[in-house]
Image: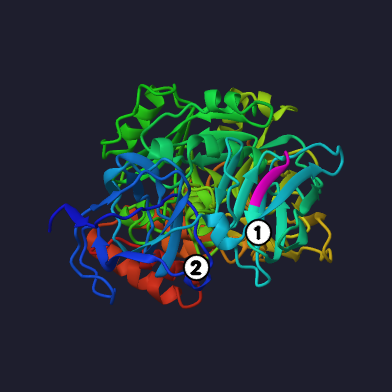
Amino acid sequence: MPKNLRVSIFRVSLCLAFASLASAAELPPGRVLDAGFHHLGDNVVKNWPEAPAEPAGFNLDIEFEAEANDTEKLLGLTQRDVDNPWILRLNGQKLGELKRGKELLERHHPIPPGALKSGRNILNFSSRSKDDIVVGKVTLYDASLRELLDLQRVEVTVIDEATGGHFPARITVTDAKTNKVEFYYAESAETAVRPGVLYTLGTPTALELPAGDYRVSATHGTEWSLAETALKVRPGATPTVRLALRREFDAPGFVAADTHIHTLTFSGHGDSSVEERMVTLAAEGVELAVATDHNHQTDYAPYQAELKLNGHFTSVTGNEVTTKNGHFNSFPLPPGKDIPDHKLADWKKLVAGIRAKGARVVILNHPRWPDIARGPFGRFGLNRASGQRASGGAFTFDAMELINSGTLQPDPLYLCRDWFALLNHGEKITAVGSSDSHTVGNIVGQGRTYVRSSAVDPGRIDIGEACDAFLRGDTTISLGIVVDLKVNKAFSMGDRITTGGADVDFDLQVKAPSWITPKRAIVYLNGVVAAEQAVPKTAGKFVNSRLRFKLPAPKHDAWAVCVVLGDPVTHPAWATEEAYTFAATNPVYLDADGDGSFRSPRETAARLLAAARAGGEDGYEAALREEDSIAVQTIAELRDSLELEERKELDARVEKASVKRPVLKEFLRYLPTGD
């Protein structure tokens, strides 16, 4: 099919940019410029009744003649399935992008005075992204957006309740049914605007709305309240909205980090410009912001300084090293140069190359994306019981994403079980939380990591100290809920604790804002549930609960992780893609035998197997006497030492035992085919 489709229209005026109207019924009759529909892209799509199944490439030109316009006009067009950036240009000048959305809807775009020229004009739709869309039914309305909708000005201000000062925030505007609504003319150098969402630095910000009844809410990330109010917009009135936010809790000794952040400017997809990203970071309370554009090392510092946001967060130059085998967030790195070789297929060489460029922390991103089978763990055959891999080589990265709020994972514990298997296998891998935000609407910092830090000023965080905390595992993972852990009153994440055969005291601090409900806290030893408690209800108040667990000293060395699960957030101001909220600690390491070191379940299993063999005992029977994590590792060690026929005999015995021990069935399920 041709890569460029040209449609000629005679003597019309067109109008473009970034607004859309509630429905075509609100508009006076317009002049139809192109009644047909066009399928742009490169894939055959058979389920679009209004457009051809065959694609027509990534460019559509509409050619027309017009007179130069000295007043605003309006263009209507109907579109479907816009997922990626599609640029609108008039006479070669970029005017904006098509709105994102799946539904077949009419969208409307104002064009400023002077954008048309007398004579021949060309309207162009184009994209560099792989995306198939429908556009068509192009209509000219000879009026401005304000005239057509009778827009009314509304002024919104957000303040810190404690100080009375203006405060960066995310403002959400909805109708009575909590659907986000369009508002208009709010764009400025200090805002980031998308349908129903306005990020502001807190100073009085004007927007325009048609007459109607609305709700306006404001948020500032995880640690702050959610403020909202009803808004009535009527012709001739200029209402003022003033929303006050209060800090409901803090996380002393930690800073809030997002290690996975994108911009359209440097990643080439999504919709957030780098300037808009600065506003969203300040408004969401992210304190340590790691720039991770794809195979690009972005320096936020000049953009942050331009907007006078240095006091709100510390920026770190990083890179999402994007390879065919996985994506790796890596930091710190020098801005703009010395890009790691992302074409390396061998993980060990890849990670070594990243470190050679200066990165101290390397994180495996979304290990089950784009889905469970095709993500890195699926492709390399991770055994979810033993932590062994069928291929892919050694894991030399430092951390993995346990929470990625931009990548839907329906089961909150699925990646936990992957991580637990790796910990049992002896991998010292820190878990992190991130947002992977590519857009303004996708909440940056919704998934985040709380990192141990001595900083008192978010603009002056010691990046080296933060990297040390990541490598030590002195961090916690958050999706709306924040936790901290003390063990035996003195130890925290990443620490080794000698139990001396005595009970072990866990003191878990659980915090959440008043608009999030944590429900259940679980303590895992070597991936096995050791204890759990309900989080006390707070009836609309913010959560600040201390949960205490007393566990008997384990028989062997063991790691411990605490997880808290909560209800999802459905409020449109901070709605979660996931059907849950979540928090988790990184491990503490219990030295049960008091020898001053920690042995993973795999190392313990190797010792037990050696001792059984030295005593003439059947290693398999010795394995079955141990708890699940040790049993699986012992069987895995035993199996690796056997020839093929002996393995088959062992597998048959394990299959029989798996009736009463499901973990053994899982171990067999993930063995390599034909092994």
Looking at the rendering, which quadrant does residue 531 occupy? bottom right
Q: Which residues are magenta?
A: 203-207
Where does the C terminus fall, quadrant-wise?
bottom left
Q: How many marks can you see?
A: 2
Q: In front here: 276 or 249?
A: 276
Q: Is residue 329 visible?
A: yes
Q: Relative to 390, does residue 661 appear above or below in the rendering?
A: below
Along the horizontal axis of the image, is 283 left or right of 134? Answer: right
Q: Residues within 10 Å of mark 1 (few under 14, many from 20)?
A: many
* Residue highlighted by disc 2: 27
Q: In front here: 277 or 567?
A: 277
Percent position (x, y) of residue 238? 75, 53
Q: Residues within 10 Å of mark 2 (few under 14, many from 20)?
A: some
Percent position (x, y) of residue 506? 76, 51
Q: Relative to 230, does residue 445 appear above or below in the rendering?
A: above
Q: Residue at x 21, y 70 (%)?
A: 52
* Residue highlighted by disc 1: 173
Q: Residue at x 54, y 39 (%)?
A: 276
